[in-house]
Amino acid sequence: MIEIDAVTKVYGTQTVVDAVSMTVPSGTIAVIVGTSGSGKTTLMRTINRLVEPTSGAVRIDGEDNRALPAYELRRRIGYAIQGHGLFPHRTVAQNIATVPGLLGWDQKRIANRVDELLDLFQLDPAAFRERMPHELSGGQQQRIGVARALAAEPNILLMDEPYGALDPIIRAKAQEDLLAIQARFGTTIVLVTHDMEEAIRLGHRIAVMDAGKLLQYSKPADIIAKPATPFVKELIGAPERPFRLLSLVRVADLAEPGEAAGAPLDAGLSARDAYAELLWSGREAAPVARDGAIVGRVRLQGLAKQAARPS
């Protein structure tokens, strides 16, 4: 668990982070979102002490993060940045092994961990271990960057605009990878982004910042349905709010008994994508399938009701 307690950071006469308090429960993803200069990256960096707060405290599982030397704290916390930050003259395996090597792991343990992470990211160890960063695609470099951040089995992973440089298709796959990894390891993740779509897709909770202040810290559904300020409402985008609500729900959650004609929709599809499919195909309803078996149907009317303004 990460507790950020009244953290303030001042540079000269400028207050970059202004008395921010928020708690990230263990094993969850918190996304900090805001425009450029809102203080979101500075706030996140107080967790691993790349930035020392002017006042306030950060506690990890109840212990002040200043109880350890900064270099030792950072070895316990994974850190992934936009553009991956790989060491250009080290192989993929050497990049991933960076922190385990600093921690004194033996070579066999390091090699096993490198191969485990490459397998996890669907990169064949035999084909990728000895490659250099310049031999990788942008998406592969980003995956290696995240693998390096996870190499020493940290309980906390910090991510600063990790997918900003990726094209939309690779970015969507990278987000899926992150959700799968987080579910597998139960890592506590704090991710910074300026993209509200990404925040809604990834976050268990979303923190919205502006001019150094925390405007709202809530579950995605609450952020969308009940924005705390006009700025939060604008950041969500008023026309997109119904569709953002639909993106939080799976078709399986809305399936009802009954039959429908046409090609089935996968139970794991988002209600937003299902709504689009029904509109495009001109259907009032579609069957819902899980593992090839029909489990019910979803109706356009029900999807529209799900997207309605909360009372």
Image: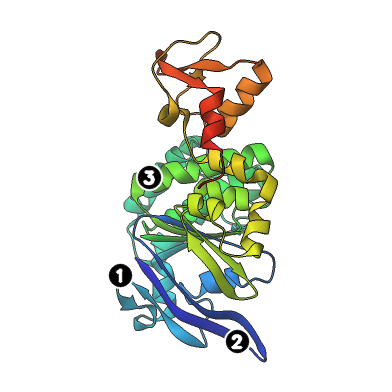
Separation (CA) of disc 3 from disc 2 = 36 Å
Outermost residue on the left side: it is 62
Task: Check disc 1 and report the residue beneath it.
Answer: 61
Residue 191 image position (x, y, % from top left):
52, 59
Q: Give the residue displayed 66% in from the left and 91% down from the top.
A: 12
Inspect this view and state whether residue 214 appears. yes
Which image quarter is the N terminus in? bottom left
Q: Amino acid at mark 1?
A: Asp
Give the mark nearer the N terminus: 3 vs 1. 1
Characterize the local packing of mark 3: few (<14), some (14-19) or many (20 or more) Cα atoms within 10 angstroms. Answer: few
Numbered disc 1: secondary structure: loop
Q: Give the residue displayed 37% in from the left and 53% down from the top.
A: 110
Task: Check disc 3 and report the residue beneath it.
Answer: 183
Outermost residue on the bottom side: it is 12
Give the mark nearer the N terminus: 3 vs 2. 2
Q: Give the residue displayed 42% in from the left and 27% down from the top.
A: 252
Residues under numbered marks 3 and 1 in contact, where contact means CB atoms less than 8 Å apart: no
Characterize the local packing of mark 1: few (<14), some (14-19) or many (20 or more) Cα atoms within 10 angstroms. Answer: few
Q: Give the residue displayed 55% in from the left and 71% down from the top.
A: 214
Residue 223 image position (x, y, % from top left):
53, 55
Numbered disc 3: secondary structure: helix
Characterize the local packing of mark 2: few (<14), some (14-19) or many (20 or more) Cα atoms within 10 angstroms. Answer: some
Task: Check disc 2 and report the residue beneath it.
Answer: 10
Q: Nearer the viewer, residue 29 or 78?
A: 29
Residue 146 is tagged as: none
Q: Amino acid at mark 3?
A: Ala
Viewed as shown, does residue 153 lie left or right of 42?
Answer: left
Separation (CA) of disc 3 from disc 1 = 20 Å
Give the total number of marks visible in the rendering: 3
8 versus 186 height, above or below: below
